[in-house]
Structures are given as structure tokens and as C-alpha cells.
């Protein structure tokens, strides 16, 4: 199984940029720690995306909307931490809880709509 998963990730996965938010060590005018986004590790990781329940909908005040909630697969040693942001096929996603298995790591992602988040890539 390990070889099959590694092969699938190398064939279907792609190198994606990864950013994590960290404390800059300075404070703003209100005494709150300032945070900044920086590249994680080497700056990229190998990832593959899948949709487990693509046709699910969520209710809102505007009625039902389809949701973009993919699941990302990573090599177990290169998996970014939870709350990291990755760019996959032109869209940014924030990773939720990362589950590590012996052969791989899995993390659901939420689409990022944050106008203040603008890394170089």
C-alpha cells in the first residue's frame, strides 16, 4: 500500500506553495502581537486534491450553496501544519486538522477569501 500511495502522489500530486502565519515579535498600536505569513519549510510541498462529498450543500440565509471543501493528501514527512495555507490550481485553501497516517497525511481545506492575504506566489 505504501508504494501505491507514493506512486499515486508522485503521479497525481503537484508542488504547491505553503505559507504559515507566525508572530513577528512586535506589537500593534493596541498591544496585540503582529502576525505575518511566511513560506513553510522549503516553500512548497507535494499535494494531491480529492473531493469526498462534492455534491453536498450548505444552508445559508440566501438558500443552499454548494461548498468547496476538498481533502488534500501529502507525504507523511512533508505535511504542513493545520492552519497553513496552500495554493492549489490557482485557489488558496486553509488546512484544517491534519491527520497523519503511517503512509500519508490528510487534511481538509477551506477556500480562503481574505483580501489581506497576498503572498508573492
Image (cartoon, helix red, strand yellow):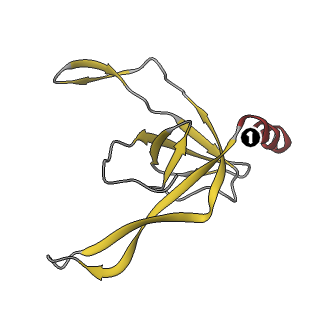
Q: Position of residue 39 (x, y in %)?
A: 54, 63
Q: Is residue 118 left or right of residue 87?
A: left
State which quadrant residue 110 falls in: top left
Q: Which residue is mark 1?
A: 9
Vertical relation: 36 (above or below) 17: below
Q: Position of residue 73 (x, y in %)?
A: 63, 42
Q: Secondary structure at mark 1?
A: helix
The image quadrant where one finds the N terminus is: top right
Report the residue at 50% width, 58% height from top: 19
Report the residue at 58% width, 41% height from top: 72
Q: Residues within 10 Å of mark 1 (few under 14, many from 20)?
A: some
Q: Position of residue 77 (x, y in %)?
A: 70, 59
Q: Is residue 63 left or right of residue 9?
A: left
State which quadrant residue 78 falls in: bottom right
Q: How many marks?
A: 1
Q: Position of residue 8 (x, y in %)?
A: 77, 36
Q: Is residue 114 left or right of residue 92?
A: left
Q: Nearer the viewer, residue 112 or 73?
A: 112
Q: Residue furthest front?
A: 120
Q: Is residue 4 left or right of residue 13?
A: right
Q: Residue furthest right?
A: 3
Amino acid at each position: 500500500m505504501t508504494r501505491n500511495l507514493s506512486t499515486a502522489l508522485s503521479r497525481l500530486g503537484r508542488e504547491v506553495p505553503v505559507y504559515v502565519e507566525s508572530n513577528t515579535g512586535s506589537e500593534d498600536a493596541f498591544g496585540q502581537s503582529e502576525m505575518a505569513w511566511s513560506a513553510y519549510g522549503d516553500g512548497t510541498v507535494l499535494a494531491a486534491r480529492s473531493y469526498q462529498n462534492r455534491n453536498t450543500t450548505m444552508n445559508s440565509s440566501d438558500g443552499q450553496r454548494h461548498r468547496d471543501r476538498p481533502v488534500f493528501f501529502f507525504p507523511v514527512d512533508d505535511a504542513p501544519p493545520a492552519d497553513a495555507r496552500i495554493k492549489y490550481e490557482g485557489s488558496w485553501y486553509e488546512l484544517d486538522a491534519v491527520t497523519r497516517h503511517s503512509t500519508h497525511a490528510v487534511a481538509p481545506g477551506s477556500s480562503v477569501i481574505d483580501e489581506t492575504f497576498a503572498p508573492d506566489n
